[in-house]
Structures are given as C-alpha cells and as structure tokens.
Image: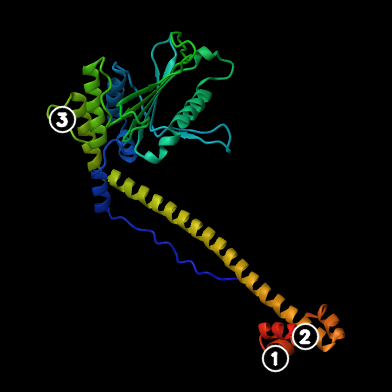
Amino acid sequence: MSVEINVKPVYVPQITFDEAKKKVGEMNLINGFMFDSVLEDKEKGIIVVKGILDTVLDMDVPVSDVQSQKVITGLDSAYHGIRFDVCIDKNIDESSNAVVYDIEMEDREADKEELPRRGRYYQALTDSKKLPTGHSYLELPDYISITILSYDPFGADSMYYEVKSVITTHPQLEYDDGVRKIYLYCRGRNNLENDKEYGERLQEVLEYILTGKKRRDPSPVIDSMDRIVSDTKDRAEVTKNYMQRWDEIEHIKRDVKREVTEAVTKEVTKEVTKEVTKKVTVQVTDEINALNQILISLGRLDDLSRSTTDTDFQRKLIEELVHKKGNIEDTESSSLK
C-alpha cells in the first residue's frame, strides 16, 4: 500500500541590478558583505581596519596587510574550519611575539548563545596553526579578538565587554595566556567612565559602523571610513558581487526548502501509508473473523481449514458469504443469537 503526494517546485526569486544597488546602498559596515567589500581594496581596507584597531585598543597599531575573510581549515575534514572577517598578523619587533588580530562584524542575534564557545574554538584553531612543531609555547602569538555587534551579547546594556583568563581563587595574581576577547555592543551604554575621551571616540566609531551616520563634527577616522564606504557602494562590481551572492543564497534556500519538503513529504507519506495499511488490516481481519464464524456455523470445517492456507479461496468465500449476505456487523450480530 503506497500513497503518492505531489510536491510543487520551489521558486527561486531574482534580483535586478537596480534592486541590488539599492540594497548595497542601505548597508553599513556592521553588514558582513559591506565590510568584506571594503576590505577587497587592500589600501582602503588597511585604513578602515587601522581606524578600528587604533580606536578600540587606544594605541597606534601598525597594519601593513589585511586578510579579508581568511579561512583556516580544520585539522581534519570532520572538524569545522573558521572564517575570520579580518585577520592581521603583526610582528611588533624581533624580540617579541607576533600578534594575531581578529575583527568580526556580528549582526545575527540568533548566534548570541554560541558566541563564547565559538570564540574559544576560533582561538584554539588559530593557535594550532600558528605554533610550528618543536617550537616553545612562549613563541605562541598573542591573540586579540574584537567582535562588533548590533545586539547586546551579555545583557548588561554595556558598550564594552572584555574577556581574559583569570585565577578565580587568586584574582590578584596575573595569568597571562596572551588572549584578549573584546565584545563591543554598538547601542550599549558607554561604560568606560575611567577614560571619558577614549569612551567617546569608541562610541562614535561604533555608532558609525552600525548606522553609517556621522556626527556634526566627525573625527578624521570617521571621515576616512565614510569616504571609503561611499566609494565602495558606488562600485558596479560590488553590486554585481551582491547579485551573485544573492543568487547563491537563494539557491541554497531553494535546495534547503526542497530537501525539507521532500523529507516532510516522505514522512507524511510514510505515516499516511501506515494509517491506511492499519485500516485495511483491521477491515481484512474483521472480514476473516466473520467468514470463520459463518463457516463454523455452517459446519464447513474443511473449507475453514483450506481458507487458512489458500488466500484466493479465502477471498472468494468472503465475497460469497460475507459481502453478499450482509455487512460484517450484521454477520457478527447474527452469529451471537
């Protein structure tokens, strides 16, 4: 017994150049596509990244190269790889370790719960790639992760969160593993009361990254960023890249919908078939029981015995004795009299 369910094809929407250009024009740096597009131009990317690093870390950070959307593969095909928005390796000088800076734009609140463990995984996999076999652990580069978010990652309504390893039983003792993780909530309250000037500079940059809006008297960092973002939005190849990305995403959505639809259809078909089979089985069982009662009442024991092994003969008897002489309920009730 099988049941056939027709599945309609999934429509893949298209986007025109003008529609894509409008979408790109509405983006800000918090959007991963826009941030990545800005960084495709190496010189402009360095200006934007340096502006962010200098402001966040409140120091002059030499940046000579930016690797946009850097991919670090997993140790095995069964393990996740990681994909940085920006990864910068910087040698401070010959006597000190390198520093790995990771800047990420985070605009998906659905990822909130996994942020801490994702950060742990990113750091661990980076470390595994940065320390050659046979080298001292003291040569492991420092790691500074900066995640800029459109939502509050920890619920304290603060602009600045910093995570470092500590000895919880002796917090006064230093535990320097070279790791800093900074989370910046663009809409958060300025909680850097100890350095108001620094807090204001950082808040201005975060506001621009989130909204694309400049203050009345913007800082040189904001002016530079805004010129680069505007130029990026006007580039035709950026719009074309967005159209290509749109098409890829829509096809992925279509494939996912199709797979889900097929899986659901298969499960529904299975359940419907099971239910239909169950009903048919009950009906056949009732018919056989009715036939057996009739054959016993008529003393046709040889036919009863034969019907248990010859299904064609059994169906013939059911047609003759059960269906033609009345329904099963009538037969059952008459046999009880």
How many numbered discs sit on the rendered protein? 3
Ranked by sequence position, the earlier of labels 3 and 2 is: 3
Cβ–Cβ below 8 Å for labels 2 and 1? yes
Question: Residue tagged by mark 2?
Answer: 294
**Amino acid beneath label 2:** Ile
**Amino acid beneath label 3:** Arg
The residue located at (45%, 64%) in the rendering is 9
Secondary structure of the residue carrying tag 3 is loop
The residue located at (52%, 20%) in the rendering is 131
**Amino acid beneath label 1:** Lys
Name the quadrant containing residue 41. top left
Name the quadrant containing residue 142. top left
Quarter of the C terminus within the rendering: bottom right
Mark 3–mark 1 Cα distance, whole angstroms, equals: 93 Å
Mark 2–mark 1 Cα distance, whole angstroms, equals: 11 Å
- x and y percentages locating residue 135 in the rendered image: 56, 15
The residue located at (83%, 82%) in the rendering is 304
Ranked by sequence position, the earlier of labels 3 and 1 is: 3
- x and y percentages locating residue 39 in the rendered image: 32, 33
The residue lying toward the viewer, choosing from 133 and 325, is: 325
Secondary structure of the residue carrying tag 2 is helix
Secondary structure of the residue carrying tag 1 is loop
Question: Residue tagged by mark 3?
Answer: 215
Ranked by sequence position, the earlier of labels 2 and 1 is: 2
